[in-house]
Amino acid sequence: MTKSKCFPIIPCFLFLLWHIAAFAQNPNCFRITFSDKDNSPYSIDRPEEFLSPRAIAKRQRFQIPVTEEDFPVNPQYIDAIRSCINSPTYLITTSKWNNSAVILFSGLEEIENQHQFINSLYEQFPFVTDVLPVAYYYAGKNIVPSIPEETAKSIVYSSQTEYDYGNSIEQIRIHNGQFLHRAGFCGENMLICVFDVGWTNFNTLPCFQSLYQNGQILGATDLIPGMTNAYTGHSHGTAVTSIMASTVEGELVGTAPKASYYFIRSDDPIREQLVEEDYWAKAAEIADSLGADVINSSLGYTEFDYPWQNIYTPANNDGMASIASRAASILAKKGVVVVVSAGNSGNSPWQYISHPADAFDILAVGAVNKDSVTADFSSYGPSSDGRVKPDIASVGWDTWVIYNEYAVQGSGTSFAGPVIAGLSACLWQALPQYSSLELMQLIREYGNRYHDPNDRTGYGIPDYYRLYLDHATNINISEQEKYSFSVYPNPTTGQLRIENGELRMENVEIYDIMGRKQKIIINYQISIVNSIDISHLSAGIYLVKIITEQGVITKKIIKQ
């Protein structure tokens, strides 16, 4: 399976022991989909039985109705199937939105004619509408994962909004996110759920202890059979979360340093199987039930380890073929900003985005470097039904992360996603009047390619602070004026003038529409540039990036 995982430039070793098992194992885990939720023990009038108070409050705030779709899978259907099987069975996971359950039937992999078994399920149980093999697991000890509840904590916030970002300033400044922080929006009272493969040592590293002391880490859930501790198994989630949550002054400050976080391991660090899409869907439902504001997922699915699981082609990137993609779209409609990494298949035979990046109404994120140049590994869009994908882009090439207690650089769309997720939490804190769908659309509209999207960065690199200035109701007019630069004449035949009343320019850089640098003017340290000669450039659209001590402003110009 091709994932959106990415790793720091220092070595990172994956588990390989699972290859000891025979590679040609037949499936023994099946996703069984049900026709209805008739005679459910749950009721719309009792949402507290399956939604947290925070989730219920969000539904009320945005007038999102609680429906039968939110009911857990009818346990009577699951019990009926398990009681009719002679060999031991294990409930691996369920999906209330897909109305399905994954059940392991011990010993079934030894049956030659599995089609006969599947047909028997259809014949015996009229409420069964689909049976799909999704995994093989050894039915040993502790096959069923534990799902702990959220731990309520009293959160302590500092008043700090001025940070020494160190090297991480570039991945924040590309979106002018530091301005959101200075304006007082650092993610307070926002909950970000992170779906990943593991958070090795996150809970013991000194650089993250303040998050626990402040009550910002609300808990962790492990959905993988045989695993019960999300703080072991893989460090990918540690690196991803550091991009959002770190407060290591002078080295790495995250995009949402005061947000609360909940971790969900939905990806198996040992093997790659189709059932991981079921875990992703379950993670989405848990995030919804907890009342999450934002989710970040650096996981993507295209191909799997067992040949019988490879049911997709790029033509299936339609937002509907994958249970994970369907769940992502539903989650967005439940009032959650859904941020998903586009994938790292740009140089592979697959080449295209992965699931659930193809989902409707979410933010699929491609990767660029700090100079806005597209990373060659970043997966291509569009979706197979022609929608713009990725939606937007951020720094996923030489991104600064925490790895083994040190700030290092790593690459992959996995690291572009959390830049966006953290800033989106801060933006929603600043603009609470918008719904999740409205906010995600605004973020697309403030991309630097909104009127000219492509298949690598979508609508481009969003300017979060400009979005905030244009839509907040309590902005000081002087802040608006301070942020504005005049670049004229536009269109131009060869000469440009740039001016601003207050801010001094450090550099001015000019890029073509493909993100290739064409010209750089260094160390102006003035507020007016009388003339920049671009007469040598070909006719077309260019981006003028104005770098100041306060941030980066990008203007679009036309060269005639």
Image: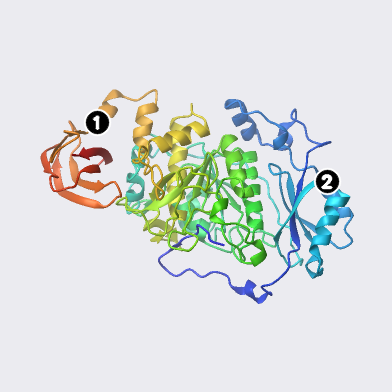
Q: In the picture shown, does residue 268 fall above or below 278?
A: below
Q: Which one is closest to the eye, mark 1 or mark 2?
A: 2
Left/right placement of residue 280 relative to residue 404 reads right
Left/right placement of residue 446 relative to residue 330 reads left
Amino acid at dot 1: Lys
Write down the residue under mark 2: 77
Viewer-proximal residue among 241 and 540:
540
Residue 42 location, quadrant: top right
Viewer-proximal residue among 522 and 348:
348
Residue at figure coordinates x 44%, y 53% from the top left: 380
| Residue 273 percent coordinates (x, y) | 64, 61
What numbered label is drawn on residue 482?
A: 1
Residue 452 location, quadrant: top left
Mark 1 Cα shell of 10 Å, populated few (<14), some (14-19), many (≥20) = few
What numbered label is drawn on residue 64?
A: none
Residue at figure coordinates x 40%, y 54% from the top left: 396
Earlier-in-chain disc, 1 versus 2: 2
Instruction: Give the quarter of the figure containing the C terminus.
Output: top left
Amino acid at dot 2: Tyr
Viewer-proximal residue among 13 and 123:
123
Determine if residue 302 is in view: yes
Determine if residue 221 is in view: no
Instruction: Give the quarter of the figure containing the N terminus.
Output: bottom right
Mark 1: secondary structure: helix
The mark tally for this picture is 2
Q: From mark 1 to mark 2, how far is it between C-alphas? A: 62 Å
Q: Residue furthest bottom?
A: 20
| Residue 55 percent coordinates (x, y) | 62, 34
Q: Residue furthest left?
A: 530
Mark 2: secondary structure: helix
Viewer-proximal residue among 380 and 2:
380
| Residue 37 percent coordinates (x, y) | 78, 38
